[in-house]
Image: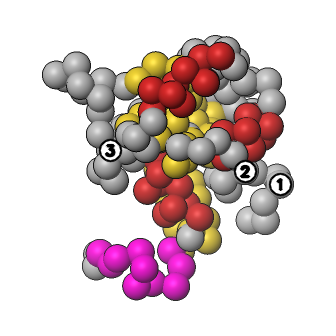
Amino acid sequence: MPIRDIDLVPMIDLTIDGADEVDQYLNGIKGGGAAFLMEKIVARYSRRVIWIIDEQKLHSKLGQFPLPVEVVAFGSGKLIAELKERHLHPKLRLDNHQQPLVTDLGHYIVDLDLEQIDQPFELGRFLDGQIGIVEHGLFLNVADQVIIGQDEGYRIMNNLQKEM
């Protein structure tokens, strides 16, 4: 299989990936591996996106998995304080040496421990508007299909809001 730079292809036919958490509407949280900015770019330029998860990652609402937010290092302490004031429970993600984890693109990750996200689209818009936030791990209306592994095989959920 040839590997190409994303900028050298007009569109990706199919992206198959995992997710850290998925709700009943096929919205997801990704970013446990700290590469969600690149994953979101790939998904944006994919004709079709399929996630494969196990049934423990499917919930009625998002938020049990901490929501990662990729932030620029400069001013990150100020941004974390602001997110704390908004009761978003931010925590700077650290590496094995207890230093800020640095993504492949040179940013920090701040995890928001929200427990339950009642309005993911509103939260996404709020995070999109914050200076210093590069991207967040909410993948809203991105997946066309989710395949859920279960003890007795699998089941498939299709995103009815997107054309198949």
Residue at mark 3: 103
Q: Report helix, strand or loop for mark 3.
A: loop
In terms of secondary structure, what is the magenta stretch mainly? Answer: loop
Q: From which residue to which does the magenta span run?
A: 3-12
Q: Which type of secondary structure does the marked residue at label 2 adopt?
A: loop
* Residue 145, numbered circle: none
Query: Would you call the spot at circle 1 few (<14 residues within 10 Å), some (14-19), or many (20 or more)?
Result: few
Please state the horizontal and vertical placement of residue 120, each as a whole percent of the image.
75, 34
Total marks in image: 3
Nearer-the-camera pick, 159 or 108: 108
Q: Is residue 144 at all visible to an observer of this figure? A: yes
The residue identified by callout 2 is 141
Q: CA distance from mark 2 to mark 1?
A: 8 Å
Few, some or many C-alpha atoms within 10 Å of disc 2 (few <14, some 14-19, many ≥20)?
some
The residue lying toward the viewer, choosing from 85 and 27, is: 85
Q: Is residue 7 magenta?
A: yes
Q: Amino acid at mark 1?
A: Gln
Above or below, 152 against 2 in this view is above
**Which residue is painted at 40% across and 41% down in the image?**
74
Q: Which residue matches tag 1? A: 161
